[in-house]
Image: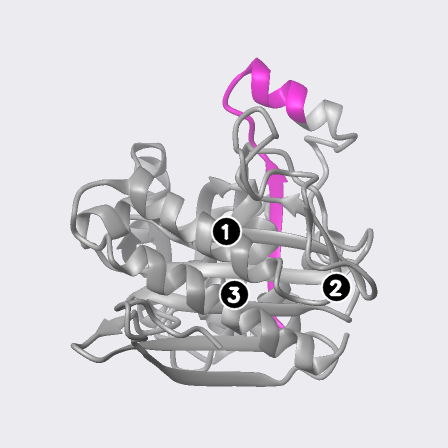
Amino acid sequence: MDRNLALEFVRVTEAAAVASGHWIGKGDKLKADGAAVDAMRTAFNEINFTGRVVIGEGSKDEAPELYTGEKLGKGGKPVLDIAVDPLECTDSVAYGRYNALSVIVAGPKGTLLGAPDTYMEKIAVGPKARKVIRLDASVSVNIKKVAKALGKKVGDITVVVLDRERHTQLIKEIRASGARVRLITDGDVAGAIAPSMFDSGIDILMGIGASAESVLAAAAVKALGGELLCRFKSKDEHQRNLVKKAGLNEKKIYSTNDLVKSDDFTFTATGVIDGPLLDGVRFTKSKAVTHSLVIRGKSGTVRYMTTHHRRDPRGDFYSS
């Protein structure tokens, strides 16, 4: 994929982050998400490419923009699959909590898993531990194997987990093993990537989270040399039917190579609120400052970008 296109996609996540950033702490997650969606779609349609949303805001009946199957871009080549979360962690933005991102993954047509809107059980680790984890292994066994692979004591291992009632037993088992638990209110895209980032302070992600976030995180984890293993964990018959309709297997354990089938992809994210991957948007009287991450699958190149967006005479922000 053209490296310049990856930089074009940064402008898209920047636009979404700045738009949603105006809603931080204002208690309205729908307006925050709507602002991000509108800004992202507008920015996408200024780029010369043909994109098809494989993971987005839901079906056409559920979402007027960035719905699964929607076409993006001005047309022409390249032709790409697009997975997006214009605003991951809408609650975090609404209530001013930790960790929120705007995220895009792009790859050649047919290379990104079109996961339905359901849940998956997951475990993610960095490069040194990628070969030792098993989704069906016990919590304590996985933690011990990761500790050995990283050259750490079990007591120095930190596991990030979404703070949900469904994880009560998981948290007990992690603590019983002797490892540390770091709870996050939202945002397991950043949580899954963090073990593959040097000096993030996170060694493992465990737990159940949204399937869309699995595909988004898998791209970055794959490029960074880590591993994410996951399996569908539908909460009801409706979700099981969605998986079946998509032609996917609830019993199969999916790896990063199953979720992202090519090395020719890009992962782009811009922080909305400070998190383990990126700082959030900063607003001043004259500008907005954004912090972004661009990862290219083929080269494994990781770029951090800080961008200053000046206000135009109307008070809006320039995005180019």
Tell which circle, 3 or 2, labels the residue nearer the N-terminal end. Answer: 3
For the residue marked with disc 2, what is the amino acid?
Answer: Phe
Locate residue 21 relative to residue 83 in the image: left or right. left
Q: Quadrant of residue 99?
A: bottom left
Query: CA separation, marks 2 and 1?
Result: 19 Å
Q: Is residue 266 above or below residue 102?
A: below
> Magenta segment, which residues?
224-242
- Residue 222 occupies which quadrant of the picture? bottom right
242 vs 69: above or below: above
Which marked residue is nearer to the observer: mark 2 or mark 1? 2
Q: Position of residue 173 (x, y in %)?
A: 35, 45
Q: Nearer the viewer, residue 148 or 192?
A: 192
Marker disc for residue 12: 3
Report the residue at 30% width, 50% height from top. 176
Cβ–Cβ under 8 Å for marks 1 and 3: no
Task: Please name the residue shown 53% across and 34% down the image.
Answer: 64
Membership of 168 in magenta stretch: no
- Label 1: which secondary element: strand
User: Mark 2 falls on what kind of element?
Assistant: loop
Helix, strand or loop status at disc 3: helix
x, y (%) of residue 114?
70, 42
| Rendered residue at 70%/81% (across/down) | 3
* Residue positioned most to the front: 313
Between discs 2 and 1, the one toward the N terminus: 2
Magenta-span inclusion, residue 238: yes
Q: Which mark is residue 49?
A: 2
Between residue 173 and residue 27, name the one nearer to us: 27
Q: Residues within 10 Å of mark 1 (few under 14, many from 20)?
A: many
